[in-house]
Amino acid sequence: MRLSKHRRATIAEMDMTPMIDIVLLLIIFFMTVTQVSELNRERLELPRLAGWEDQKQTTMTINVDAAGQVLVSGNAMSVAQLLTLVSVELAKLGDDPQRMTVVLRADQRGDCRTVNQIVNALGRMQISRLRIAVQVPA
Amino acid sequence: MKLSNRRIQRHRRLQLPMTSMIDVVFLLLIFFLTTASFVPTERDLESSMRVQASRATASDFQPAVVDVVPGRSGFVYRLGQRELDDPDQLVDLLARFENKAQGAFVRVSDRAPFLMAAAAVQACKTAGFASVSYIPLGEEP
């Protein structure tokens, strides 16, 4: 006599395929939108203007915060020290000022005192390619 | 005589171990979720900007010179005899200049807000000037 029914053990299986699809899509999304943080870009409140053209590769990025402090690659420095740094970069370019492109990222809340000092100093070094970075309004 | 074991093969299911892959994928997802920062898009305002260390001479005042200087009530854009505080009005005025190929000059006082200096350069470009020269004015014009 057979008293108990022989039940085959059932294994609950979740269908993982849609979840993996979505997770992989999320990863691809974050990989594409994540910008590798550039060390030479300080967190500044740039002027919200349309700008004129997209940013290109530059030789040097100079940050000026709202207090007028000059920052290059995360290091605070005086205008005199900045000029030393510019001279080094200029030497790498064969002392040709025309090959040097400088991007000036200045905080819109500050005044033009430091910016003018930098512009004057660059002018004395015959560096004429200067760009002002702006933030495109949303 | 049995030549093939097809019957046995039919019932064998190939199972890939997904656990480790899902672990890695989730780790990657958490990494990107935590490190992602959405930075605003930046553009360049002027690529043909010329730095002029020396003060502008009388001949530099052609064809358009915009001063960012203190006015009666705060800093203003001065174009000729007119004082403006709205960049859009500045664009309208600059657009009336005919010889835009010669470029424009933006002269900025040391104490002027940088936002106004950038807005003046932007106005010149928007008005159609081929190049814009930035001229530091010093403390006062």
Image: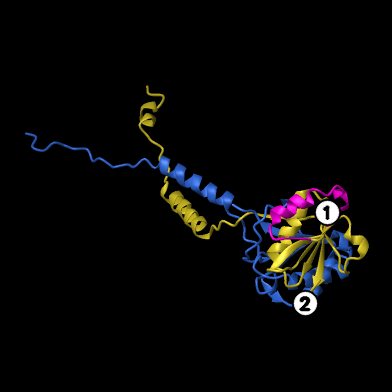
Q: Is residue B89 left or right of residue B48?
A: left
Q: Which amino acid, mark 2?
A: Gln
| Mark 2 closeness class: few <14, some 14–19, many ≥20 residues within 10 Å | few
Tell me the distance, in whole angstroms, between the alpha carbons under discs 2 and 1: 30 Å
Q: Which chain is yellow?
A: B
- Camera sees residue A56: no
Residue A86 place in picture, x, y as percent: 81, 70
Query: Disc 1: which chain?
Result: B
* Quadrant in the picture for residue A63: bottom right
Residue in view at x 25 percent, y 40 percent: A10
Colouring: by chain
Badge count: 2
Image position of A2 with respect to B103: above or below: above
The residue singled out by tag 2 in the image is: A81
* Quadrant in the picture for residue B132: bottom right
Residue B31 place in picture, x, y as percent: 50, 58
Residue A34 lies in magenta, yes or no?
A: no
Name the residue furthest left. Answer: A1
Name the residue furthest right. Answer: B59
Q: Nearer the viewer, residue A57 or B20?
A: A57
| Magenta span of residues | B82-104
Residue B96 lies in magenta, yes or no?
A: yes
Q: Which chain is blue?
A: A
**SS state under label 1:** loop
Q: Nearer the viewer, residue B56 or B130?
A: B56
The residue singled out by tag 1 in the image is: B131
Q: Is residue A32 left or right of residue B21?
A: right
Query: Disc 2: which chain?
Result: A
Question: Looking at the image, is mark 2 or mark 1 nearer the viewer?
Answer: 1
